[in-house]
Image: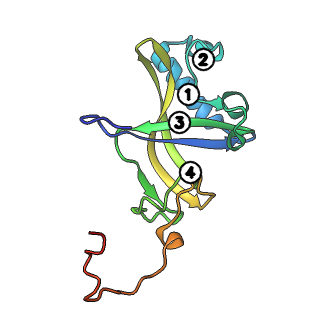
Amino acid sequence: AMNVGDEPKYALTLLVPTSADLSALKKAVLAAAVKKFGVTGPDLLKAGKIKSPFRKGNEDRAGDPLYQDKIFFAAKSKEAPRIVDASLHPITDHFEFYSGCKCRISVYAYGYEVKGNKGVAFALNNIQKLADGERLSGRKLPEDEFEVEENKSTAEDNGDDFL
């Protein structure tokens, strides 16, 4: 929820199978830890003394079938990410990109230290939607909820019926 005067923020959570190759992302996380916290950064990450962006669904979301056997992480930005389809055409209809889509994202890792919290996080750059998936929000397309209505306005239908 945003409060009046708050800067807009954009975020997504990516769920990937535990078998996914995250080596490039892990390498970026280690480099960000070194840049922010020095040569001991990777050791601090491994010891859990600073937060890693990666979370285990079986542990952190136990009981939620959506997260089982998944690794998940957030990526955030103060600027709206550009979203394209598989052919690199811009997606401007917010309903076309939704929670549950299969996508590819570009991110960069950075170290942070805010109010006693220390760790490495991902900044969100761009998103490429690769395929549709189960719409996790349960929200439906308007054309799936409504039928076409012919213009039925008549002299009798003046809008005063409820008065």
What is the CA distance from the residue labelled 1 to the residue labelled 4? 18 Å
Residue 51 coordinates in the image, percent (x, y): 56, 20
Number of other residues with Cα within 10 Å of mark 4, as a class: few under 14, some 14 to 19, many 20 or more: some
Residue 1 coordinates in the image, percent (x, y): 39, 38
Three-letter amino acid code of the residue under disc 3: Ala
Residue ID for mark 2: 45
Residue ID for mark 4: 104
What is the CA distance from the residue labelled 2 to the residue labelled 3? 17 Å
Three-letter amino acid code of the residue under disc 1: Val
Q: Are marks 1 and 4 in contact (CB under 8 Å)?
A: no
Q: Earlier in the sequence, mark 1 or mark 3?
A: 1
Which color mode does the image show?
Answer: rainbow
Q: Which element is circle 2 on?
A: helix
The residue lying furthest to the front in this view is 163
Q: Earlier in the sequence, mark 2 or mark 4?
A: 2
In this view, the residue in front, 87 or 50, is: 50
143 up-or-down from 47: above or below: below
125 up-or-down from 112: above or below: below
Residue ID for mark 3: 74
Residue lying at 44% horizontally and 11% vertically, measured from the top left: 116
- The label number, if any, that marks residue 73 in the structure image: none
What is the CA distance from the residue labelled 1 to the residue labelled 3? 13 Å
Q: Are marks 1 and 2 in contact (CB under 8 Å)?
A: yes
Number of other residues with Cα within 10 Å of mark 3, as a class: few under 14, some 14 to 19, many 20 or more: some
Which of labels 1 and 3 is toward the front? 3
Q: Earlier in the sequence, mark 1 or mark 4?
A: 1
- The label number, if any, that marks residue 29 in the structure image: 1
On the rendered structure, is 17 left or right of 91?
right
Three-letter amino acid code of the residue under disc 4: Arg
